[in-house]
Image: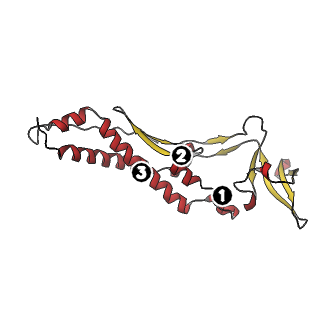
Amino acid sequence: MSGLSLRVDVTDAVGPRPTAFTEGMENRQGLNERIADRERNLVRDYFDELSATRHDTANRLGAEPSGFWDQARGGTTSMATEEEAVITIAKAGIGRAGHDVTITPGPGKQYLTIPLIAEAYNKRAYTVPGLFAVREKGAEGTSGLVLFKKEEDGTITPWYALVRSVTQHQDRTMLPSDEALENEALAGVRDYVDQLLARKEVA
């Protein structure tokens, strides 16, 4: 996400300067709070829209969505100081909006488990009884490990692929556009200025 720089000039063109207006522009805490609130709500609303429409992996497998976008919405908070307005999204994977993300196994683990069927989606492999690993030959002599399970009817079903790492390429559409974020920040500035101008105090 690109940075956003805003400049507000105060002149005498409208007559005497309101004291509240001048003080409000000198101390930017209130201004940044207004911007942060609007940006937070924009991001949350955007996640709501994605939650209703975007479930790529779940749709491919025919599985129930994992609730990723709802969790991202719940993890979106804001704060402000005199210097800045900050939006924080406490959800792993959202960084992919700004850069490629490489996922590797956690401590003590060698592989990631990639679900191959709907029943495996959003379920940890260790909770599935009866899985066994088979090394399968791929194209051009490559090979990979797959976790299979013998079902009750005797069929053998692949549940997970085992991989050393996964790289997910940058996807800017996981967050509102720079233009939308900038427009919302400017709307916050207008709201704040209108609030200051509505006050009755004058110098």
In this picture, is 187 found above or below 24? below
Q: In the image shown, does 7 or 200 lie closer to the viewer?
A: 200
* Kind of residue indicated by mark 1: Thr
Q: Which amino acid type is marked by label 3? A: Asn
Q: What numbered label is drawn on residue 85?
A: none
The tag earlier along the polypeptide, 3 or 1, is 3
Q: Nearer the viewer, mark 2 or mark 3?
A: 3
According to the picture, the residue beneath numbered tag 3 turns out to be 41
SS label for mark 3: helix
**Quarter of the rendering containing residue 109:** top right
Q: Where in the figure is residue 131, as x and y percent of width and height?
A: 85, 53
Secondary element type, mark 2? helix
Element class at badge 1: helix
Write down the residue under mark 2.
97
Q: Quadrant of the C terminus?
A: top left
- Answer with mark 2 or mark 3, whichever residue precedes in sequence: 3
Q: Position of residue 178 (x, y in %)?
A: 42, 47
Q: Which residue is mark 1?
A: 57
The picture places residue 191, in percent across and down from the top left corner, at 27, 48
Residue 16 percent location from the top left of the image: 9, 38
Q: How many marks?
A: 3
Label 2 sits on what residue type? Ala
Q: Is residue 4 left or right of residue 125?
A: left
Q: Residue furthest left?
A: 15
